[in-house]
């Protein structure tokens, strides 16, 4: 009866995982493991959950979970593939090859295995062998073939070649959302942020319900903001920054964005552009939920603004609501 309960929790956890309710899925898996820790599928799905966050610590936990699953079920193809993928990311190529080649022997119809083996060969510079594997992911050289090639080249750090292949995929299918997303990722790595923005906007237009695409757009806008700040184009910098924050205030730019606001306010003050000062302070106020440093920026900006009585009243009303 206990085993039945554990499998019931497992099935519910898988359902939650597919609905992207990962915390609930983790809790269900942990509960099931207390009932029966010898079910390999529990360790496999625990690994899947942990590998969603690809930091070093989480990856180690995920690998240990897949290893536990394989100790209990040595021919567990999915666990071999997932562990092989993580070894590939960790650049432990011999371990990755061992897992993926074993998975391929057990499941030669699983095309994704050829893709990962192709990525592995690409990563170590064996392009001929990589092409042999990647050619088996598609029966013909269609958009999926070139997309797979681009993905492998991207993962191997060969961004120019990846761009050539993803462009071929897009030429064959103008509505290929994943190809536009990959193209944006490639261009971002190449430092071509405006082109990356254009590509991710095309992807988001094709799939407007995918919040991940909009988050990626925000991160590119932050990069553009940072680049413009370095060039001392403070007004353009704050424009990009506010656009990014408008998409998702939970995302954090990886630079000191309070300086962007501070410099922009100084520029707006010189131009006596009070409307834009107010707009800038609105964004600062919203962002204060996450960043205490901006309080000082706002306070200093308020002290030195030569605003008319109407604007002073608007400012007071704004912060006393």
Image (cartoon, rainbow, N blue to C red):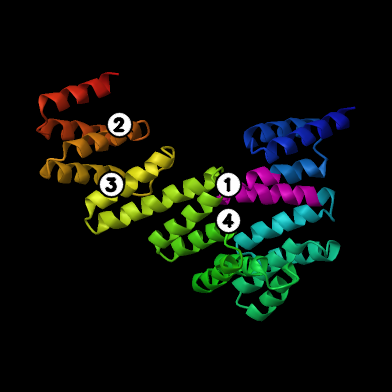
| Residue that label 1 marks | 53
| Disc number for residue 238 | 3
Which residue does the image show at 17% across and 22% down from the upper left? 313
Question: Which quadrant holds the N terminus?
Answer: top right
Q: Is residue 195 left or right of residue 32?
A: left
Camera-nearest residue between 36 and 205: 205
Question: Which quadrant holds the C terminus?
Answer: top left
- Tell me if label 1 and label 3 are in contact, CB under 8 Å: no
Establish if 232 lies above or below 58: below
Which of the two marks, 2 or 4, is nearer to us in this view? Answer: 4
- Tell me if label 3 and label 2 are in contact, CB under 8 Å: no
Sequence-first disc among 1 and 3: 1
Q: Main secondary structure of the magenta part?
A: helix
- Give coordinates of residue 51: x percent, y percent: 63, 48
Q: CA distance from mark 1 to mark 2?
A: 31 Å
* Residue situated furthest top in the rendering: 321
Q: Mark 3 Cα within 10 Å, few/some/many (few <14, many 20+)?
A: many
- Tell me if label 1 and label 2 are in contact, CB under 8 Å: no
Q: CA distance from mark 2 to mark 4?
A: 35 Å
| Disc number for residue 177 | 4
What is the span of residues highlighted in magenta in the rendered image? 47-70
Which of the two marks, 1 or 2, is nearer to us in this view? Answer: 2
- Tell me if label 4 and label 3 are in contact, CB under 8 Å: no
Sequence-first disc among 3 and 2: 3
Q: Is residue 50 magenta?
A: yes
Establish if 217 lies above or below 131: above
């Amino acid at each position: 009866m206990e085993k039945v309960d554990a499998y019931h929790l497992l099935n519910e956890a898988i359902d939650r995982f597919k609905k992207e309710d990962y915390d609930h899925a983790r809790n269900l898996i942990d509960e099931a493991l207390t009932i029966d820790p010898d079910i390999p599928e529990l360790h496999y799905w625990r690994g899947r959950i942990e590998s969603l966050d690809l930091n070093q610590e989480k990856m180690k936990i995920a690998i240990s979970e897949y290893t536990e699953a394989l100790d209990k079920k040595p021919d567990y193809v999915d666990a071999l593939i997932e562990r092989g993928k993580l070894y590939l990311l960790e650049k432990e190529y011999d371990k990755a090859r061992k897992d993926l080649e074993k998975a391929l022997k057990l499941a030669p119809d699983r095309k994704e295995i050829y893709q990962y083996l192709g990525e592995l060969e690409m990563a170590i510079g064996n392009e001929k062998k990589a092409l042999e594997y990647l050619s088996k992911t598609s029966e013909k050289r269609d958009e999926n073939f070139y997309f797979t090639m681009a993905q492998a080249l991207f993962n191997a750090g060969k961004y120019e070649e990846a761009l050539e292949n993803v462009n071929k995929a897009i030429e064959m299918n103008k509505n290929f959302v994943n190809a536009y997303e990959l193209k944006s990722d490639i261009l971002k790595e190449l430092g071509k942020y405006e082109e990356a923005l254009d590509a991710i906007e095309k992807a988001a237009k094709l799939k407007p319900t995918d919040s991940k695409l909009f988050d990626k757009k925000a991160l590119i806008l932050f990069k553009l903001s940072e680049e413009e700040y370095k060039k001392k184009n403070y007004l353009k910098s704050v424009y990009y920054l506010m656009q990014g924050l408008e998409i998702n205030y939970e995302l954090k730019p990886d630079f000191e964005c309070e300086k962007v606001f501070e410099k922009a306010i100084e520029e707006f003050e010189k131009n006596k552009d009070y409307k834009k000062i107010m707009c800038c302070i609105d964004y600062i106020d919203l962002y204060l939920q996450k960043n205490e440093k901006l309080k000082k920026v706002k306070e200093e900006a308020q002290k030195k603004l030569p605003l008319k009585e109407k604007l002073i009243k608007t400012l007071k009303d704004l912060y006393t609501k």
